[in-house]
Image: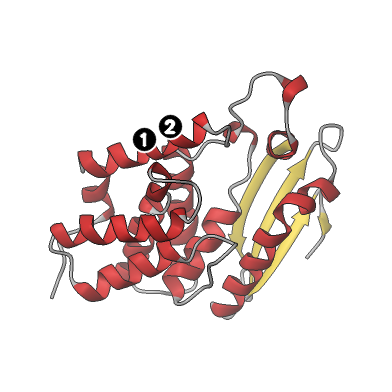
Amino acid sequence: MASIVTYKYIKQNPDIMEYIRRADSALEALGYTEHSFAHVERVAATSSMILTELGYDERTVELARIASIMHDIGNVINRIDHAQSGAVMAFRLLDNLSMPANEICSIISAIGNHDEGTGQPLDAISAAMIIGDKTDVRRSRVRNTDFLTFDIHDRVNYAVEHSAVTVSGDKSSIILELKIDTEISSVLEYFEIFMDRMLMCRRASQFLGTKFELIANDSKIL
């Protein structure tokens, strides 16, 4: 059964867009970094790039985009267990759009398994989305405008002047390259808060038959 549900269709759905906005507003109230459209669209772009580079079919790439843009909607309920609550929300929304069950399963399993505390890559879509989500570290995600009150998450994100995810030419590695201003935050601090995320990226890359590499300030770390 073919589906009419596309990434473009989802982005034009006012209900889903409202859930994304309200989920980000909830995280803003809790002091978290940006999780709004800039984040979810970047996750969608990265996950689809990875699957395209690795030769996956167009519909698999499209489902990764859809899962990515919806992956954080559970934060509107609570930050705790947001991956699981978001998966349940996505099921209802997509079922109401008459998306086929096999496609819903791919999307909700990716959403339900993207958190580093409980998640695991289960298929190509979930693996690519995990990498897209966990590698989105950048200065523009910091909401706090008072440098003197930065916590470690603010400081590390703000220190990242450039980040890019690429697939190596021989398709053997997925590479996260960072440029970090070490006068703001050290590379060690990056690992202090992001180690679990980087290990999850490594598991996701292995699921896709590749290695995960991290290059920070031109030095290979992983």
Tell me which amino acid carries mark 1. Answer: Arg
Vertical position of residue 162 compared to residue 94: above or below: above
Q: Which mark is residue 183?
A: none
Name the quadrant containing residue 22. Answer: top left
Residue 35 x/y as whole percent: 49, 40
Looking at the rendering, in which quadrant would you find the C terminus? bottom right
**What amino acid type should be assigned to the residue bearing mark 2?**
Ser
In the rendered view, does 195 fall on the left or right side of 61?
right
Q: What residue sits 57% from the left and 71% below the top?
A: 204
Judging depth in this view, the residue of 46 and 122 nearest the camera is 122
Location of residue 148 with respect to 71 vertically, above or below: above
Query: Which residue is nearer to you in this view: 134 or 116?
Result: 116
Which element is circle 1 on?
helix
Q: Tell which of 205 and 106 is nearer to you.
A: 106
Q: Is residue 128 left or right of residue 162?
A: left
Rendering coords of residue 175 (x, y %): 66, 62
Relative to 219, 135 lies left or right: left
In the drawing, does residue 4 fall left or right of residue 199?
left
Q: CA distance from mark 2 to mark 1?
A: 6 Å
The secondary structure type at the circle numbered 2 is helix
Q: Position of residue 65 (x, y in %)?
A: 37, 57
What residue is shown with label 2?
Answer: 25
Quadrant location of residue 212? bottom right
Question: In the image, what residue occupies the spot 62% across and 74% down?
Answer: 203
Q: Residue at x 60, y 59 (%)?
A: 166
- Which quadrant, please, contains the N terminus? bottom left
Q: For mark 1, what is the residue?
A: 21
Dot 2, crowdedness within 10 Å: few (<14), some or many (≥20)?
some
The x and y percentages for residue 183 are: 87, 32
Q: Is residue 220 above or below residue 152?
A: below
